[in-house]
Image: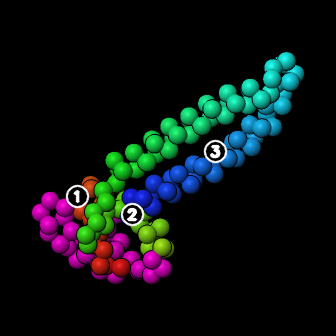
Amino acid sequence: MLEKKIILYFLDDKWKEHLREMDSLRYSVQNAVFEQKDPLIVYKQNAFHLFQERIYEINKKIISFFLNFTIIKNDIICINNKMIDSFLKKNRKKIGRNIKINIRHLITGEIKNIKFKQVDSFLKNGEWVLENNNF
């Protein structure tokens, strides 16, 4: 379910960008008349290339996201440093820097109870993950 939401987020974001570019393309194609070209044909060609580029960008963004992030479904969430703030805002619970939380080592299964301000140093190497029941 989480994977579907991530894919839909990237699709939605890129599709909005695509519609804005298509709108600007419509106005830029009007200059094709001065070049004695059919504006409809120029618009179709440019729109096709723009669409192909957009599909490539969507695929690249989704694949790079899933290769860079590990998503574990049970009681563990693995997120990088940039996503900590957005994750906390989404859950609408304020967490202070000195609150103790649990992290788990992916290989050994060791659980540590550390302060939230120390989480960054553990998550950087990718071997530690936040446990879901912390929040």
Give the image quarter of residue 34: top right
The residue furthest top is 36
Tell me where residue 131 appears, x and y as whole percent.
27, 72
Region rendered in magenta: 91-120
Q: Which mark is residue 127?
A: 1
Please tell me the numbered disc located at residue 27: none
For numbered disc 3, what is the local secondary structure?
helix
**Residue located 35% across and 62% down the image:** 79
Q: CA distance from mark 1 to mark 3?
A: 37 Å
- Do we see residue 127 in this rendering? yes
Residue 24, image x, y percentages? 75, 41
Number of the label disc, if any, that sits on residue 2: 2
Relative to residue 21, is residue 86 drawn left or right?
left
Give 27 or 40, whichever is nearer the viewer. Answer: 40
Q: How many marks?
A: 3
Q: Amino acid at mark 1?
A: Glu
Earlier residue among tags 1 and 3: 3
Residue type at tag 3: His
Dot 1 alpha-carbon crowd within 10 angstroms: few under 14, some 14 to 19, many 20 or more = few
The local crowd at label 2, few if under 14, some if 14 to 19, many if 20 or more residues have their Cα within 10 Å, is: few
The residues tagged by marks 2 and 3 sit, at their Cα atoms, a distance apart of 24 Å
Quadrant of the frame with the C terminus: bottom left
Instruction: Judge from the rendering whether residue 116 lies leftward or rightward of residue 102; answer left or right.
Output: right
Q: Residue under circle 3? A: 18
Asked whether the beta carbons under mark 1 and mark 2 sit within 8 Å of each other, the answer is no
In the image, 92: left or right of 97? right
Query: Taking 115 as reference, is 3 above or below it?
Result: above
Q: Residues within 10 Å of mark 3 (few under 14, many from 20)?
A: some
- Secondary structure at numbered mark 1: loop
- Would you say residue 64 sits in the magenta stretch? no
